[in-house]
Image: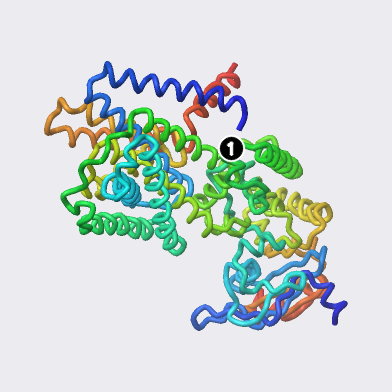
């Protein structure tokens, strides 16, 4: 048991959530191992994004418990959960549109602010060095995504694909142990999708973290995930390697229906 | 705190002191009065900008905070038994500071509901707060109730008003240009994303309210000690709206924009006095035209010096 538990970075134990009478997610059991790349798929309305919102604390589960590295995070507010190491992106991009690309990343460093009001009011040495370090760090992170040259631009002026990449960069700036990507390929063309696949594999290696991925693009999911969980009507209907999932009759039924 | 700061601050303070003398000796009282009102309006608009413009929390109760500051400071210098000891520049300074702190506390109380409300709903709550303050003052006999509070020592000079305006501008500017400022801006842009990036949104909303209302209280204290008289009607809903106009016209989140907005809203009606009864028709018309031409406010999200730098870099790009 203890060795089994140690292998779990994130653990959802029998989690359910009700919206009025609707069971959006019911008795969901799931764990994410360190450095794992896991896919979460399912038809529209299956409850995938709800699960993301449960993990990140946007929703509180009706029953069940969520544990991160052995610590219960079920009742924590979102900003506490980020501090403990879970970062996310959003299905419909939620950048700080009117702020610069650089500021978007700098905001993620705020939780380790490193100075207090007297420092910032008096512009002490501590303030100046912390700020300079942050900018340097943010720029080198943006460089990985090829965005450093456009750090001064307003985020909403970036092309769509770059906005998606910036959102990932912003999430990585919180230095997470687990990264949750909510349909990162939505709205990208096939060329950009290939780039994204490479980016995701690169992130995992370079930042040494686990990734949980919601995606509708089967080629992408099957191509990079080690393990896939299939969800329908809030319940897990299948789990396994991409190979197993592809051949699973239940999955085919959920996506295509039966005659 | 570096050398450059003192190199700028000392001449500025000296210049303000000199100007104070000059205005009192050579300029007629009406013009001086408009200049003083400008300074107070600047403090009000810059401070409201932190809540409305940066943190994106629509507050319509700024006059209420100003009233708290004005009455607390004025009470300390007049009604309070220890009154006479407050009748000096130092005493008035302390009284005004106390007014600011009291307003800051009021800001904390109003900040709390803002955790649950946003947009129009928050605007209504803050509006309600402003009115409650006014009505409460209206019913406190000890501070004169509806008759107002006369006999306040007229000790807030041009110098003190503009020193406080400079402090307000400097403090707010430094807050905005820091991690705290970025946290506030992220609230305005997208609260859910901010929370998901580790920003304690509740904490920063309340902080924004406290800082903003502190300076509104300071403005109130300066106002009271400049007028020598305060009554509840000075802090009506109209005053709050006026400050919102200054902020929106100057540009949300732009401190220099707020200053320009404050000056326009204070000075323009004076220039329109020749229109007599049509003044209050033409003034709103000018505001409407300004907003149509520059819907993001005069400066948008930028500071005035950023606009110039932008143009310069454009020229470079063209050449």
**Residue bearing the label numbered 1:** A122
Q: Badge 1 sits on which subunit?
A: A
Find residue B93 and report its image quarter: top left
Position of residue B139 relative to residue B292, above or below, is: below
Position of residue A160 relative to residue B315, above or below, is: below
Q: Position of residue B104 (x, y in %)?
A: 42, 51
Residue pictured at 54% horizontal, 38% vertical:
B174
Position of residue B270 relative to residue A224, above or below, is: above
Q: Position of residue A132 (x, y in %)?
A: 69, 37
Q: Nearer the viewer, residue B208 or A227?
A: B208
Check disc 1: other Cα within 10 Å, few if <14, some if 14-19, many if 20+.
some
Find residue B199 and report its image quarter: bottom right
Q: Is residue B80 visible?
A: yes
Q: Is residue B307 left or right of residue A13?
A: left
Residue pictured at 64% horizontal, 63% vertical:
A80
Image quadrant in which the C terminus of chain B is located:
top right
Residue pictured at 72% horizontal, 40% vertical:
A133
Q: Is residue B292 visible?
A: no
Position of residue B182 relative to residue A90, above or below, is: above
């Amino acid at each position: 048991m203890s060795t089994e538990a140690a292998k779990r970075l994130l653990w959802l134990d029998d989690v359910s959530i009700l919206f009025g009478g609707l069971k959006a997610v019911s008795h969901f059991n799931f764990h994410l191992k360190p450095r794992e790349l896991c896919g979460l798929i399912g038809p529209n309305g299956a409850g995938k994004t709800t699960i993301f919102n449960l993990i990140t604390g946007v929703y509180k589960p009706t029953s069940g418990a969520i544990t991160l590295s052995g610590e219960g995070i079920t009742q924590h507010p979102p900003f506490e959960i980020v501090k403990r190491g879970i970062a996310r992106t959003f299905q419909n991009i939620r950048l700080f549109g009117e702020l610069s690309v650089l500021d978007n990343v700098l905001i993620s460093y705020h939780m380790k602010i490193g100075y207090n009001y007297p420092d910032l009011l008096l512009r002490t040495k501590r303030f100046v060095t912390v700020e300079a370090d942050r900018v340097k760090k943010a720029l080198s992170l943006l460089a990985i995504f090829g965005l450093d040259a456009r750090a001064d631009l307003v985020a909403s002026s970036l092309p769509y694909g770059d906005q998606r990449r910036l959102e990932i960069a912003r999430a990585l700036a919180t230095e997470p142990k687990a990264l949750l990507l909510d349909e990162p390929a939505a709205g990208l063309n096939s060329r950009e999708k290939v780039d994204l696949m490479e980016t995701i594999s690169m992130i995992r290696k370079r930042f040494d973290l686990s990734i949980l991925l919601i995606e509708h693009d089967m080629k992408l999911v099957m191509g990079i995930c080690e393990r896939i969980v299939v969800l329908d009507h809030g319940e897990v209907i299948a789990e396994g390697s991409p190979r197993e999932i592809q051949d699973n009759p239940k999955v085919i039924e959920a996506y295509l229906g039966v005659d | 705190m570096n050398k450059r700061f003192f190199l700028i601050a000392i001449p500025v303070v000296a210049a303000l002191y000199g100007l104070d003398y000059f205005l009192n000796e050579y300029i007629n009282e009406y013009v001086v009065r408009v200049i003083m009102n400008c300074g107070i309006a600047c403090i009000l608009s810059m401070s409201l900008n932190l809540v409305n413009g940066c943190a994106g929390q629509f507050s319509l109760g700024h006059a209420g905070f100003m009233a708290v500051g004005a009455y607390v400071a004025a009470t300390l210098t007049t009604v309070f038994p220890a009154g006479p000891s407050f009748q000096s520049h130092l005493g008035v300074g302390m009284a005004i500071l106390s007014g600011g702190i009291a307003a800051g506390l009021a800001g904390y109380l109003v900040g709390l509901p803002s955790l649950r409300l946003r947009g129009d709903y928050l605007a209504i709550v803050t509006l309600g707060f402003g009115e409650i303050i006014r009505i409460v003052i209206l019913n406190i006999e000890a501070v004169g109730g509806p008759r107002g509070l006369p006999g306040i020592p007229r000790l807030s000079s041009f110098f003190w008003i503009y020193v406080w305006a400079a402090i307000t501008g400097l403090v707010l500017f430094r807050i905005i240009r820091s991690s705290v400022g970025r946290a506030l801006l992220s609230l305005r842009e997208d609260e859910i994303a901010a929370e998901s990036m580790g920003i304690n949104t509740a904490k920063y909303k309340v902080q924004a309210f406290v800082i903003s209302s502190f300076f509104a209280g300071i403005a109130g204290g300066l106002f009271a000690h400049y007028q020598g008289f305060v009554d509840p009607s000075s802090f009506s809903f109209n005053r709050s709206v006026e400050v919102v106009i200054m902020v929106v016209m100057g540009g949300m989140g732009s401190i220099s924009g707020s200053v320009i907005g404050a000056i326009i809203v204070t000075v323009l009606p004076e220039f329109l006095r020749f229109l007599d009864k049509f003044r209050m028709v033409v003034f709103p018309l000018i505001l409407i035209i300004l907003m149509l031409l520059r819907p993001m406010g005069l400066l948008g999200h930028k500071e005035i010096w950023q606009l110039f730098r932008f143009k310069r870099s454009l020229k470079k790009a063209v050449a």
